Amino acid sequence: MRSKWPLILLAAGVAFSCVRMGPDRQTESLLQGLDSYLETRDLYVSQKQNQLAALSKLARDISDPSLRYNLEFTIAQEYFAFNFDSTQAYLKHCQQLAGTNKERYEEASIALGHLYEKAGSYMEAYTLLYGQLDSARLSKALLPEYLWVLYDFSHDLAGNSGMVERLSIPSAASYRKQLMPLLPENSERWRVLLRDQLIDEQNWPAADSVAHILLSGTRPDEHNYAIHAFFCSEIAGFSGRPADRMKWLVESAKSDILCAVKDYASLTMVAQSLLPVDVNRSFRYLRIAQEDALFYNAKLRPWQISRFLIDVEDAYSQRQAESRKLTIIALGIMAVLAVAMSLLFRFAIGRSRKLARTRQELEQANIQLASANVSLNDLNRQISRADKVKERQIVTFLEGLAGQISLIRAEDNRYRNLLKQGKADALLKELSITGRAEKAREEFYESFDRTFLAMYPDFVEQFNALLKEEARVTPPEGRLTTELRVFALIRLGVDDSKKIASMLDYSASTIYNYKVSVKNASLGPRETFEERVKMIGKQ
């Protein structure tokens, strides 16, 4: 009974070290869908770039200033959430193309001011919208657009005022009061203003109803869908519905990807929500958001992401402390296991010596042959059980070693002090050059190969005897190939593909492919191949 305690301790330790908090099943399903969109985001960006390149070429071929103004203003709108510099260049050129047409010049100026405020260039927006434009001189057609931009400016500034000193501009509510009578009732912008008013009043059910009406009027491949879905998530968060908040954040992020939007907030907020339960996925989303923010090249998003980096640093510090604790526990478990294995081997050797003495006595005393045979069979059964215990011990020990690879991989992440400086590009470079986990994995393979071949020196020869000649494996001296390691673990009693994949640091599908490939080359029935492998060394 005492020999079972190391196994129990090891199982408990491995189970403890493998515990990881993670998203719930519903959230995981949403995130898997988002991951699929992120994998294809380059395709949508390429399509967007091709579309913009075609429009730009068409604009260059137009000589009439009026026609070119119309097309370049459209191009600027297409660039608005894709690239700040290109949008700014086209809107400034529209100002030039407007010439003496005052209304067109003011239209381009309003759009440029809107671009500045959305990008976080609040002083530039303030100077242009309040210093160079006068609502009293604007046409009736432009006045609602101008008031809409001022409303958006005041609304956004209230949420991001930490970037600049507080500007003295009227409140969003005052602009809303002026703007609503100028808009067609139940139009999209009218409903946006109504939704915002209900949010200010904390009337969450009514605000949610209006937000969903807005959402139903758009498609996922339209940028406004991402914006309306984002506000659905905000309302759900204020209403105490975290699952709905995550759902609409993910929907907003997916729409941003479909529309090839580079200036967004949803993916960053998804990353922030995931930080306590999935650090790796959170960091991956944050890295993508930062890449897009740098591509867009404005002030606001990088500033928002940099504020989030401190939370990432705290999460990695906590992960570092947990890793140290798990390492100490694992070392203790392995020490206990080593002592237990030593005692087990000593026990097996003692049994083997006793068996030899029994056989010698049998040769000298034929009269006791029947009883001696009974004793011999009993000893053989005990040794067989001991061998099985030994194999289980070795498998469990190898699982512990394999677990260390994952621990080392996580440990690599804790030295990233560049997080404190917000140098995420340097952080990514540091993360990409580490090789500690790969080195540990190679050392684990070498240790596994050496140990297994010492126990079963004829394994490769007997394994090849089960295969067609052209499929036989010739590994380097003293080493195993990947397929040999897979079936070596099967010989030790590990036949679950997921468990083999975890121990060898491969995906389950890769292990499955190795098994299918080898079985297809079997001399006998492929269905019994694994059972014949398990009999190697027992015959």
Image (cartoon, rainbow, N blue to C red):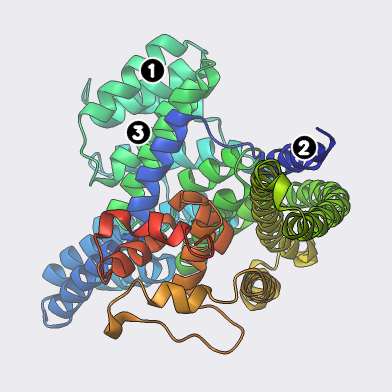
Q: Quadrant of residue 106?
A: bottom left
Q: Residue at x 46, y 33 (%)?
A: 27
Q: Earlier in the sequence, mark 2 or mark 3?
A: 2
Q: Position of residue 66 (x, y in %)?
A: 14, 68
Considering depth in this image, is 123 or 509 the residue closer to the camera? 509
Label 2–label 3 contact, CB within 8 A:
no
Q: Is residue 160 left or right of residue 332?
A: left
Considering depth in this image, is 232 or 335 the residue closer to the camera? 335
Q: Which numbered circle lies on residue 228? A: 3
Which residue carries the number 1 mark? Answer: 208
Q: Position of residue 70 (x, y in %)?
A: 17, 63
Which residue carries the number 2 mark? Answer: 4
Q: Is residue 360 above or below residue 204?
A: below
SS for callout 3: helix
Kind of residue indicated by mark 3: His
Kind of residue indicated by mark 1: Asp
Residue neighbourhood size for the residue with mark 2, other residues' Cα within 10 Å, grouped as few (<14), some (14–19), many (≥20): few
Is residue 162 visible to the viewer in this orientation of the structure? yes
Measure the C-alpha gap from mark 2 to mark 3. 60 Å
Q: Which numbered circle lies on residue 17? A: none
The residue mark sitting in front, 2 or 3, is 2
Q: Quadrant of residue 113?
A: bottom left
Is residue 289 visible to the viewer in this orientation of the structure? no
Q: Is residue 54 above or below residue 490?
A: below
SS for callout 1: helix
